[in-house]
Amino acid sequence: MLRYRSVLKPISRYLRSGMTECERLLWSRLRRKQLHSVQFYRQKPIGSYAVDFYAPAARLMVEVDGSQHQDQINFQNDAIRDESLKSQGLRVLRFTNRQVVDDLDSVIWVVEEALKSPLPPFTKGG
């Protein structure tokens, strides 16, 4: 099990109750083991972060980013966050709100391909 900062638990609960429309749309296709019988969790605390969607069996996290993620500061923060999560053996997929709204089937296809691909070996520390 991945560790997380305990202060994230109430934040994750709050985020689950206030999902964006794009997150709800994607969640409708990820929930209830619809993709290859893989369980996803939403707004899951991992390390110092609450990730949008997480499938522990596949070590896969999926993020849905609004337009604020396109500015330089948030883009750099996302890169740091992704590297931190990858260092824990996780695979990271990022999609924009526009991708989810305009082409949800393609987003789901990418997630399915990630679920089908073999997990890379992981040893703690890299």
Image (cartoon, rainbow, N blue to C red):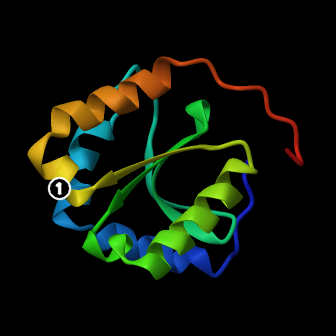
For residue 70, side relative to residue 11 (left or right): left
Q: In which image quadrant can residue 121 be found?
A: top right
Return the x and y of residue 57 as percentages of the image width and height: 59, 31
Residue 68: image location, x then y, percent: 32, 77
Mark 1 closeness class: few <14, some 14–19, many ≥20 residues within 10 Å:
some
- Outermost residue to the left: 102
Residue 103's quadrant in the figure?
top left
Number of marks drawn: 1
Residue at (69% x, 65% y) in the render:
47
- Extreme residue in the front direction: 72
* Residue receiving disc 1: 98
Give residue 20's position: percent from left, percent from top. Answer: 23, 67
Q: Residue at x 30, y 71 (%)?
A: 17
Label 1 is placed on what type of residue? Answer: Arg
Identified at 22% across, 59% down, the residue is 97
Q: Is residue 35 visible?
A: yes
Please tell me whether residue 10 is drawn above or below residue 20 in the rendered image.
below
Location of the C terminus (image quadrant): top right
Counting from the top left corner in percent of width and height, residue 16 is at 36, 67
Which element carries disc 1, helix, strand or loop? helix
Residue 33 appears in the figure: no
Front residue (pair 18, 62): 62
